[in-house]
Amino acid sequence: MTKGHKELPLTPVSDTPSTINLTGLWRVVRPVVDLSKCKKCTLCWKFCPDAAIELAEGEPHIDLQYCKGCGICSFECPAKCIVMVKEVGR
Amino acid sequence: MVMTGNYASAYGAKLSRAEVIAAYPITPQTSIVEKLAEFVSSGELRAKFIPVESEHSAMAACVAAQTAGARTYTATSSHGLTLMHEVLMWASGARLPIVITNVSRAMAPPWSVWVDHMDSIAQRDTGWLQFFCQSDQEVLDTIIMAYKACESRSVMLPAMVIEDAFILSHTSEPVDVPDQELVDSFLPAYAPELKIEVGKAMGFGSLVKPDQYMEFRYKAMQGMEDARERILSVEKEFKHIFGREHGGLLERYRCDDAEVVLVAAGSVASTAKDVVDAMRAKGVRVGLARIRAFRPFPHQELRALGSKVDGLAVLDRSYTFGAAGAMFTEVKASMYSLQRKPAVKNYIAGLGGRDITPRTLEKILEDMLVVSKRGAEDEVEWVDVAGLPRRWR
């Protein structure tokens, strides 16, 4: 139901955080990590613009609910252990 | 105290107890934030001073801190202000009553550090209140009044206090610095209804679909309209406590029974008052209307004036290419609904810091007296341009 201007706050403020927007569906390529080659430098975690990488004892785990598949982690990884793979059949 | 317009700005922000100051240096603004940095480092002002890497970041830091419930201040000039443009829009849309000083300076190229109003005028559609000041005292007083007016529940919009480069920013004048206790009694601490709170998840600046966007813009429009009355009531209260006033939205000087009135903004108004006095002494019926608030624009006040005079000479210290001076366009639009319209002519003068002398203002008023009887050859005239046949000095 559309609210009249008098019922609205001064500026749009939501009480739900933006994490309700699952942006993983935007992805056309998916990062795949070869943990056996990972040097635990955490650069991928630092560079991820969507904070979609979680670290577990220094190793990256990608949260595919939010990862948009931009490929920055793969580009930055000095060990070349992250490859971007086409999403198919989703 | 004897101080420059820039120090008047710094004292205004200090007396208003700004809690976060984010700043990037630019001529001729720098001494404002240098003075504030001194106040903060000496402990005279309890505030967080954030040196940033650009004016865009300065305004972004103010937006963030104000969203968290702090009273914020910054100062800039010219290219600094225009670099802020995007975030200025954010500040008004987010309904954050930030107050800044803009030391109005010409835009380059040609490179210039001297006064004109192009930088400020270019921000007229950002949803900010804009006050053009005439004296150092007015700069200090207007900053305090702007916080109070803008933080009103009915307004909640940001304000730009404008001082002319060098003419005010670097010229020392006697300035009464009010007692902190008096200012505190006039301006209570900033307490917004909505702010970022630790432990309470909220999203600010959310996406709004077409079915609700217009309603938010409508509310911002109402805020700016309500600011008209608020500016006047705040100034009335200020006068009651501090004994000074500066003219509301439109200051009128010797306009009663005037045939022709000069309409201008900024420091040139003080020169114009002397010119009006001198011409009045010779029996010529002229006056001055100083546009103090450019946003909200004093349409009603100008209409009341315009219905009683034969001519309005609108002096613009900037030029909107492909149109005319911005003040002129608005003044002329104000007159449209009048049955008996005065002649209105635009004089473009004083760009890039060129002096507007008493003699030039006298010639403008003399020209307008003729135009109001016989009509104008040109509706917009550039004053004092080398190579043009007409002499203005």
Image (tube, coloured by chain):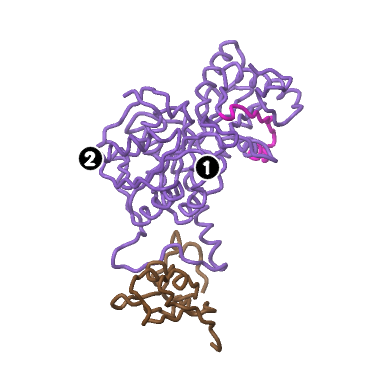
Compared to residue B148, the image places residue A67 above or below, namely: below
Is B109 placed left or right of B171 in the picture? right
Is disc 1 on the same chain as disc 2? Answer: yes
Q: At which x and y percent is residue B239?
A: 37, 32
Chain ID at mark 1: B
Is A79 placed left or right of B391 in the picture? left
**Residue type, mark 1 in image:** Arg
What segment carries the magenta color?
B332-352
For the colour purple, the matching chain is: B
Which residue lies under the disc numbered 2?
B43
For the colour brown, the matching chain is: A
Whether residue A64 is in magenta: the answer is no
Q: Secondary structure at mark 2?
A: loop
Q: Residue B10 occupies which quadrant of the picture?
A: top left
Compared to residue B89, the image places residue A39 above or below, namely: below
User: Crowding at label 1, few (<14), some or many (≥20) Cα neighbours within 10 Å?
Assistant: many
Q: Secondary structure at mark 1?
A: strand
Compared to residue B13, the image places residue B388 above or below, namely: above
Q: At which x and y percent is residue B46?
A: 25, 44
Chain ID at mark 2: B
| Residue placed most toward the observer, B226 or B113 | B113
Is B178 placed left or right of B159 in the picture? left
**Residue type, mark 2 in image:** Gly
Real-space Cα distance between discs 2 and 1? 35 Å
Is B28 placed left or right of B237 in the picture? right
Which residue lies under the disc numbered 1?
B295
